[in-house]
Image: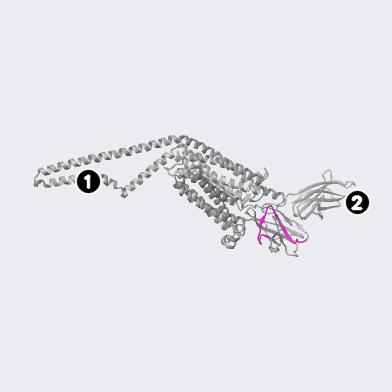
Amino acid sequence: MTQTIAPRLRTLVLLLLAAACALLAGAGPASAHAALTGGDPREGAVVDKAPAQVSLTFSESVSMDDDSLRVLDPRGKRVDDGKPFGTGGATYSVKLHAGLPDGTYTVTYQVVSADSHPVAGAYTFSVGAPSETSVAVSGQSAGGGFVGGLYGVGRYVSYTGFAVLVGGAAFVLACWPRGSGVRVLQRVVVSGWLALTAATLLLLLLRGSYTGSGKFADVFDLNLLGEVLQTKPGAALVSRLLLLAAAALFIAVLFGAYDKREDEEKRDLTFGLAVGGSVVAAGLAATWAMSEHASVGLQAGLAMPVDVVHLIAVATWLGGLTALLVALYRGPADTPVPALAVRRFSRVAFGSVIALVVTGTYQSWRQLGSWTAFTDTRYGQLLLVKIGLVAVLVGVAHFSRRWTAQLAEAAPAVAGAAAARRAEKGAGKASTKASAKASGTASAKAGTKASGTASAKAGTKASGNAKVAQKASGTTKGSGTAKGTGTAKGSGGSPRAAQLARQRAAVDAARQKRQRDADPNRFGLRRSVLAEAGIAVVLLVVTTVLTQTEPGRTEEEAKAAGGSSAAASAPSTGAVTLDMPFDTGAQNGKGVVRVELDPARVGANDMHLYVERPDGTAFDLPEVKVALTQKAKSIGPLPVAPDHITTGHWSASGVQIPMAGDWEVAVTVRTSDIDQVTISKNTQIG
């Protein structure tokens, strides 16, 4: 049964790992966590004269350097002085050269948001009138390329290492103290420490290039590394390395002095290790909480400790699950995981799940802000996937708890059978020793008797029988040698004896492993824990991608403010149709004017006018004029003179809309030399 199902479980885990890798590979560069919510001039605006400066406003505070904000003319030449200055926590400006000519200008920016993620984007505005430009504004991104991908892998490895380190140590201390002497558990915890340490060093080296040029050569720039150390994320990474040094001392004590203590002595040391380990784990979790999502936005003072609890709960559950899985599959046959340890971990995992639900609910509210954000934002969609995975994981854990209960019920019977086998084995050894002793005594007596007989015969014979006596004496010597067989056997130092001892030990270990694996309850537990671990891998990947995704609340606020995560939001591209009835008061002075504006966006548009009588037939008018006005910004009226195309149809191309907003479209209709009327309607453009 074990041989049949185990390959299926391995296939399941491989599929889950493949799905996890695909999800991680498709994550792409980190999304913008600080969204551009405004610009002056705004995207697509057409201004009469060149502004003295360009200002950008973000949804949260950002950091900039001299090259973070650039303004380029139509030929791609910089027209800014290259020194951004702040006018507020989230607003930065850059001065422009004087006397800029008319044309379309491009604003590009690359900054670092307060939650440590790079943000990049671009948009255009025009002076006088729009013109062609050689600058491409599409594809503006940050945190991508090879360095960005490597940085994402480092983040995933760091989260995984943290979970294995904290969860594995918690499993040993809280659930199975004797497991501190199990070598595979020691390797698990040490591997978690090594993975977290290596990933932290990698992130520290990549940080400057990740938030800047994206070039791999900049990874080894010491000046850039010095700048990183002065930032909040750099300080968090250095603090993590210092805390990992303390974690190394904790591991040395846990698998050194703690393991060598007796059970009674371990109780005194367990409390101290638990307190010290909790402090180190909380400090490690705080290095994420103080530099990422929790440190900015609403209620940051409450969000950071909540995030610490959330991270520790995840690590305790998933890392402990990893330790249990390794102990069940790779643990020594003579030291199986006891049912009591599994029951303890079940209770610890249940408490972790409760903490995850409470802290996760608060984090979801804080990062989303509305129910619609679950489906309308990428962050909300990923969060739904994470919630689904947690639900599945809890369901599989339910089966693990059932197998744990059955394992606990079967434990006394298994222990009794093991005791009986040990007693039987001991009795067998005693019987063997008794037989050997009896055999040696009988051999000695036989030798003595043979010696006496040989001596008597030798005394009776004459000198001619001397050879017979000598032969008898030789027989006696051989008999005496036979008596010393026990001594030869007891020497035990020969290579052959050592090889036989190793073979017997291997056979005993294999027999114990077969007996352990034959337990249906233990096999069921191993199967369910393996499934949990496979789902946990995907869950960690989704969590890592979530930390690199723009929160739903920020994305919706940016949309409402006319911006997006990478640049100001694109204008509307839908055509506008307005039907406006008119009556000049003259004979045949009634009708309907239909105005079509396509694509109704900032910049150039096509306008078509159709005039119809009340019965729907087209007819011509002596004159039709159009004017566009935006009263809120005191723009206009901007006159439009359409050309007559055919009966009842006028058209104008290249109609310029300088900025988005609520525009009044006014149409003047003249049906005779003295009869005319002006009608108007408002519409949203851009």
**Residue 519 sits inside the magenta stretch:** no
Q: Residue 670: x percent and y percent? A: 87, 51
> Which is nearer the eye, 515 or 183?
183
Q: Residue 622: x percent and y percent? A: 86, 52
Q: Residue 134: x percent and y percent? A: 69, 61
Residue type at numbered disc 1:
Thr
Q: Is residue 64 above or below residue 676?
A: below
> Which is nearer the eye, 120 or 455?
455
Q: Can residue 378 be seen?
A: no
Q: Is residue 222 above or below residue 602?
A: below
Check disc 2 and report the residue beneath it. Answer: 674
Q: Can residue 675 be seen?
A: yes
Say which mark, if any, is on residue 118: none
The quarter of the displayed image where residue 90 is located? bottom right
Please indicate whether residue 517 sits to the left or right of residue 609 in the image.
left
Please tell me how crowded label 2 is: few (under 14), some (14-19), or many (20+) other residues with Cα within 10 Å: few
What is the number of callouts on the image?
Answer: 2
Residue type at numbered disc 2:
Ile
| Sequence-first tag of 2 and 1 | 1
Please indicate whether residue 54 sits to the left or right of residue 647 in the image.
left
Magenta residue span:
49-69
Check disc 1 and report the residue beneath it. Answer: 481
Badge 2 marks a residue whose secondary structure is loop
How far is disc 2 from disc 1 in space, using C-alphas? 148 Å
Please tell me how crowded label 1 is: few (under 14), some (14-19), or many (20+) other residues with Cα within 10 Å: few
**Residue 62 sits inside the magenta stretch:** yes
Q: Is the image coloured rainbow, by chain, by secondary structure, or in one colour?
A: one colour
> Which is nearer the eye, 323 or 48?
323
Badge 1 marks a residue whose secondary structure is helix
